[in-house]
Image: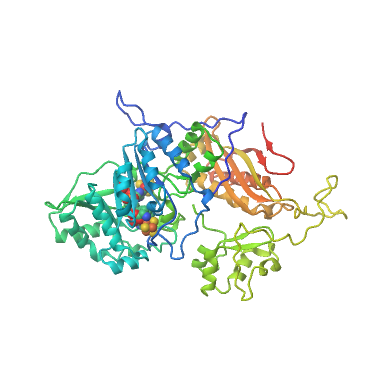
Amino acid sequence: CSSGAPVTQPCPGEPVVEVLSRPRPFLGEHAAPFSAFLTDSFGRHHSYLRISLTERCNLRCQYCMPEEGVPLTPKADLLTTEEILTLARLFVKEGVDKIRLTGGEPLIRPDVVDIVAQLRQLEGLRTIGITTNGINLARLLPQLQKAGLSAINISLDTLVPAKFEFIVRRKGFHKVMEGIHKAIELGYSPVKVNCVVMRGLNEDELLDFVALTEGLPLDVRFIEYMPFDGNKWNFKKMVSYKEMLDTLRQQWPELEKLPEEESSTAKAFKIPGFRGQVSFITSMSEHFCGTCNRLRITADGNLKVCLFGNSEVSLRDHLRAGASEEELLRVIGAAVGRKKRQHAGMFNISQMKNRPMILIELFLMRQDSPPALPSTFRNSLRVQVLRHRVSFSSQMVTLWKGGGVPQAPLVAQRWLGSSLPQRHFSSHLDSDANPKCLSPTEPQAPAASSGPLPDSDQLTHVDTEGRMAMVDVGRKPDTERVAVASAVVLLGPVAFKLIQENQLKKGDALAVAQLAGIQAAKLTSQLIPLCHHVALSHVQVQLELDRTRHAAVIQASCRARGPTGVEMEALTSAAVAALALYDMCKAVSRDIVLAEIKLVSKTGGQRGDFHRT
Ligand SMILES: Nc1nc2c(ncn2[C@@H]2O[C@H](COP(=O)(O)OP(=O)(O)OP(=O)(O)O)[C@@H](O)[C@H]2O)c(=O)[nH]1
Ligand SMILES: C[S@@+](CC[C@H](N)C(=O)[O-])C[C@H]1O[C@@H](n2cnc3c(N)ncnc32)[C@H](O)[C@@H]1O
Ligand code: SF4
Ligand code: SF4
């Protein structure tokens, strides 16, 4: 999940979950072993870290960003500069020697020059690169170069200004060209130009792009169009590497293949006598996962071990919870250890959920919206039920006002089900039956019914006539509530090994259990009869393998601001994640024990904090 409440430390007395030792390639007598934390179970060393500096962008490229835009993470949830540098320092200490700053558009982050300058101080970091759309490049490059920027990749998908505006939905062609020339002038070599090739859009410009390399020291890189949420990827729109190569060879039969660079995304070629070169990034038709050395940190602080994997872990939450370096490394090591051998294949990844590209570098789409909704609506629908009130994202309002989905209020109400009385809903519609957009920071509407608070010596779940009743929490003050619960699944050696190697026939058990836990937290009020519906602001479920016990240790953490706590959400989440793990493994063993479901900590309630000792 993208979100995640501050993660608590393992409790004293809890079993220590060790990082699994992974096979390491032979390194020679004198070479220092590469960090085990950054080595995955296939022996790949992750020495290249991509950090997204922002989710924002001054362009709107069709292949990267859904037309209706992307919901942005609140600023407070994005990594601060200090957090970025702390993480970078840690990764570099462990052996990362190349960092690429990306985004969104990294050059719209106001302190980008300062970030480069501070990264430059990190001993062991050999390359600091940026991937940019080039709009602000000419202006910033001199300062960036002085600060220590060593490599530049610039995106440009067409050499026709009018087409540029169509593809990126903004103006700016000439600024990008100016940026490219500035990079050449300042001595960057080669200047890499990234061109995403889409059939019917720009595949007719391949030769024009190659022609640029005759006189300029460019590496023009043709990129196969990749599928991400909301980018309308379609196999027919993708132009494969082989097809592009054929087109080039017809014009330049002498095209020469250059030696492969280790762990590079690109296959490079050169036309003899040309100053520059041409490359192909073949993520779709010929993946290069075997030599993958990349990790990513998203702008909201999640570690994403694979571009096409949707498993993420929040380093931000661990940092903010005061995790020590060792604890952070343990979390990083566990995530790297779970990295898959390769991506799931072109067609599978086009079916799976992943962030839109602009946010990769979690936005977990609501997956529980009713299937009857038109997909554009489903993807952009963001409705929050904040105890007795409903708020809609501005994006949603635009859609509505644009007449896209006139039945939206009804549909949303159906989605929310009967849990929300009509009056609460309609009070947020204006006289034209359009929703009023309330931001989550606006004062909350008073609770609809707020009877007396229960007496402390009264049974809280029984009314004065002895019937079952929910506690009325309407008058309790809203406070920030966090609860963490855990569960242990004793898998036995057979299921443990299969999970560890991700070899279960049913698929990635840890990922399924994690999602089940997140879903369960959201559904708690529907499962536990007298439990209130709580508008959760974060749910995080983490699973780690404990080799000593052949167990999976689950930790679920829930956060909400409100008058009632979230321990039931955290407990339900951990319990259901454990059940889901059982379900994934029952075909290989029934000797699986679900154990130790317990509350680890709870903060923010009137009765004081609880920490299990
Ligand atoms: N499959 C896969 N493709 C990637 C990954 N990182 C980048 N790419 C592809 O490479 C393209 C260009 O990305 P860049 O930001 O220029 O990064 P790069 O290719 O790693 O750049 P260099 O560091 O110069 O090698 C992207 O559009 C992707 O198609 C990755 O981790 N996995
Ligand atoms: C997400 S952008 C971020 C950096 C910067 N804003 C830029 O455009 O260069 C990083 C790279 O991903 C590429 N990209 C984005 N969406 C893609 C897609 N669907 N398929 C292939 N490459 C994509 C972009 O062209 C760009 O080169
Ligand atoms: S590819 Fe880069 S420039 Fe284009 S929308 Fe995505 S982040 Fe912005
Ligand atoms: S798809 Fe995943 S494993 Fe493959 S190269 Fe990209 S990040 Fe690495």
Residue 220 in view here: no
Residue 167 in view here: yes
Give x and y (percent) for residue 598.
66, 38
Give x and y (percent) for residue 336.
44, 39
Residue 210 vertical placement versus 557 (above, below)? below
Residue 160 vertical placement versus 12 (above, below)? below
Residue 397 vertical placement versus 363 (above, below)? below
Quadrant location of residue 33?
top left
Quadrant location of residue 235?
bottom left
Residue at 59% from the left image edge and 52% from the top image edge: 519
Colouring convention used in this rendered image of the protein? rainbow
Q: Left or right? Give the position of 31 relative to 216.
A: right
The furthest residue to the right: 465
Q: Nearer the viewer, residue 91 or 18?
A: 91
Q: Which image quadrant: the C terminus?
A: top right
The furthest residue to the top: 29
Residue at 83% from the left image edge and 52% from the top image edge: 462
Give x and y (percent) for residue 194.
29, 55
Q: Nearer the viewer, residue 229 or 392?
A: 392
Q: Left or right? Give the position of 203 relative to 2.
A: left
Quadrant location of residue 48?
top left
Q: Nearer the viewer, residue 53 or 483?
A: 53
How many marks do you count on the picture? 0
Give x and y (percent) for residue 284.
33, 54
